[in-house]
Amino acid sequence: MTQVTERATRLRSQAVAGLSGFARTWLVFIGAVVVWEVATRLAESVFFPPPTEIVSTALQLWFSGPASQLFLSDVVFDHILPSLGRCLAGWAIAVILGVGLGTALGRSRTGMDYVGPLFAFFRAIPPPTLVPVFMVLFGLGPGMQVATIIFGAIWPVLLNTVDGVRAVDSVKVDTARSFRTPTPYWIGMVVLPAALPKIFAGLRLSLSISLILMVVSELIGSLNGIGHELISAQRAFEFPLMWTWIVLLGILGFGLNSLLLAAERRVLRWQPNRNNDG
Amino acid sequence: MRSLYRNLVGLIGFFLLWEGAVRVGLVPELFVPPPSEVLATTVGLLGQEPFIRDVIATVLAWAIALLISVAIAVPAGLLLGSVPWLRNATRVIVEFLRPIPSVALIPLVLLVVGGGPEAKITLAVYAAVWPILFNTIYALSEIDPVLMDTARACGTSRGRMLTSVALPHAAPFVFTGVRMSAAIALILVVSTEYVAGAASGLGNFILEASSGGSNMDEVLAGTVVAGLIGYLINDGLERIGKRAFRWNEVAGEAAK
């Protein structure tokens, strides 16, 4: 009984601490925005519009649609959703390929010897330099963008998976072997879970790379998308509009990263040393 | 020795596959020239002065950007890592600034700084600061409290503790951050040159070669050189790290 109350008190104090931390976090954030507002109003630079102007431009740009589209304007459907779709599709394909290939290469004793230097070289190529090649191969459009994203995002996942798969505890290897565990179970229930922390580290890196390459490929050659709108706003000297896209990219980056972190925390809850930092 | 042999087999196999795919007609030769042609072009380009100048411009911008990011991020990381209230206060701002894809700032930087070498250096610094900053803060938070208490019990001053306990402990982590930043800075330098059409640089070379549409061998040669630079930078830093931090058992761990 006392244990239960103790636990409840602890939970409550944790909740209070979390809440006050949350409030403090947002207070600082609001303070920073106020400073930004005051600074831009004082500086009166055309390049740096005050945040209130950016927000009002953004509201008008994104939420001026009819009720049948949930008040989202056409811009959301024409530019933001296609961009997000390409980013996530490229990332998903890179993850599937990377984890699959990485598991195979990590389990094989000589596989990495054959392709290791090749992959190290591929990873070192700045992906935007391959945009012209993908452009002539796939034309202007989603194919080129997804190909660029896959090429950039696959390496962190692949190399981290190889590392993680290789580092499986030798006791687990021997135990599984002595029970004659069938290969599918062995891969799915021993190797991959053991490699998951490493894989997740790769996933996070490759997600931010995907977002960067989405923007780059749209800046260079695209007919729609966030990057395309960003560069055309700059060329038209519409600075508040340009800033709304920059802010949106920041929000997207923050949101996607937080989602992945939440997923990681859920999936890796069983890990003993992860429970401490909650 | 055997692994070296396998490395070579892998590389040669890849080139043969590429050459074969082009020769058979799987990919149009106009779009993706065979590797023999690309290698010949690469060798030819390396003998030309304008191309060498582009490469030097890129590498120089990269080196300056990396130096500036180290000079900003390490002191900032040490400050934020050793003063808890400051770290808490700035955490949100850092968390909101970091995920902004640096390339989204390309249009803004072009307007404010102009299209010169300053633009690519600014962007590369913006992107390269984060890994070093986070690794420095992380390293300081991971210091064994016993070490700090021992130093304090011996009457070590605050400044001395920073230089004799905290810095040596943090160095391998910071170095890993520098390695990550080096790769990011190179990507940003080349991307900015490519997107913004800088006056010189490897990215600009690729942009000009690709604008005709028929010089794909030069585009790929530029890509190969960019990849080689990236590979050499990463390999070089890895070697330096292994040498410099041989005394540290986490260095092997941290280097990943």
Image: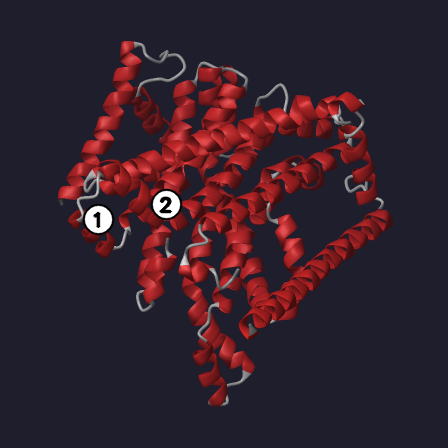
Question: Which residue is located at x 23 percent, y 22 percent?
Answer: B16
Q: Secondary structure at mark 2?
A: helix
Crowdedness near tag 2: few (<14), some (14–19) or many (≥20) residues, C-alpha within 10 Å: many
Where residue B43 sits, quadrant-wise, is top left
Query: What is the chain letter for disc 2?
Result: A
Horizontal relation, residue B120 to residue B47: left or right? right
- Which of disc 2 and disc 1 is earlier in sequence? 2
What's the CA distance linking mark 1 and mark 2? 23 Å
- A142 vs A172: above or below: above
- Quick one: B60 or A106, which is closer to the camera? A106
The x and y percentages for residue B99 are 60, 45
| Label 1 close to label 2 by CB (< 8 Å) | no
In what quadrant of the picture does the N terminus of chain B appear?
top left
Query: What is the chain letter for disc 1?
Result: A
Question: Which residue is located at x 24 percent, y 53 percent?
Answer: A172
The x and y percentages for residue A97 are 37, 31
Label 2: which residue? A160
- Quick one: A235 or A219, which is closer to the camera? A219
The x and y percentages for residue A182 are 21, 39
Horizontal relation, residue B32 to residue B106: left or right? left
Horizontal relation, residue A200 to residue A240: left or right? left
Residue type at mark 2 is Asn
Question: Which residue is located at x 41 percent, y 23 percent?
Answer: B218
Observer-side mark, 1 or 2, equals: 1
Where residue A102 sits, quadrant-wise, is top left
Residue type at mark 1 is Ala
Colour treatment of the image: secondary structure
Question: Which residue is located at x 55 percent, y 36 percent?
Answer: A212
Label 1: which residue? A176
Q: How many marks?
A: 2
The x and y percentages for residue A194 are 33, 50
- A33 vs B21: above or below: below
